[in-house]
């Protein structure tokens, strides 16, 4: 019991010095604190998925407009290729949005 009391006393005496050292490191910028939040990670993943879906949507829309223009100018082969590319992008957008919706239902 006496040994434990001595250890506790020594720890209590050394504590202010350790706090000063830690505060000095913090002021110099030598100390880094890492905070990880599951909610922040989830929102970041959702934001990334939304941005990717928007990019695919823009690319798909541009491809479909190009396909329409090519079809009007009787370039049927090129129009078919652009249409397939555009529809593939639209499919990717729909898949990404359904995945985001499924994740949202799972976490809410």
Image (cartoon, rainbow, N blue to C red):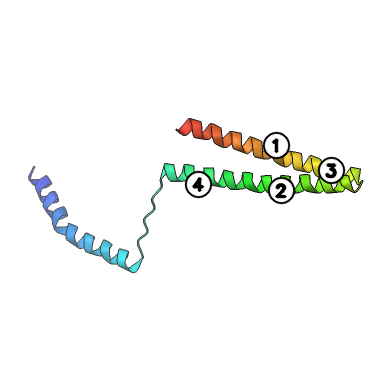
Query: Cα distance, mark 2 to mark 4?
Result: 23 Å
- Which residue ends up furthest to the front in the rendered image? 72
Residue, x 18% and y 57% (percent of image)? 15
**Above/below status of 44 relative to 99:** below
| Residue that label 3 marks | 81
Q: Earlier in the sequence, mark 3 or mark 2?
A: 2
Q: Earlier in the sequence, mark 2 or mark 1?
A: 2
> Could you tell whether 27 is left or right of 75 in the image?
left
Residue, x 33% and y 68% (percent of image)? 28
Element marked by disc 2:
helix
Nearer to us of marks 2 and 4 is 2
Quadrant showing the C terminus: top left
Q: Earlier in the sequence, mark 1 or mark 3?
A: 3
Rendered image: mark on residue 59: 2
Q: Earlier in the sequence, mark 4 or mark 1?
A: 4
Quadrant showing the N terminus: top left
Nearest the viewer among 80 and 107 is 80
Query: Cα distance, mark 3 to mark 4?
Result: 35 Å
> Could you tell whether 2 is left or right of 79 in the image?
left
């Amino acid at each position: 019991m006496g040994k434990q009391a001595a250890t506790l006393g020594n720890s209590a005496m050394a504590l202010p010095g350790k706090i000063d050292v830690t505060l000095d490191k913090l002021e110099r910028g030598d100390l880094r604190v890492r905070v990880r939040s599951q909610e922040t990670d989830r929102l970041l993943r959702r934001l990334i998925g939304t941005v990717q879906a928007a990019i695919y949507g823009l690319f798909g829309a541009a491809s479909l407009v190009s396909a329409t223009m090519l079809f009007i100018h009787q370039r049927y082969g090129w129009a078919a290729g652009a249409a397939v590319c555009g529809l593939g992008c639209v499919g990717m957008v729909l898949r990404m949005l359904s995945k985001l919706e499924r994740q949202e239902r799972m976490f809410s």
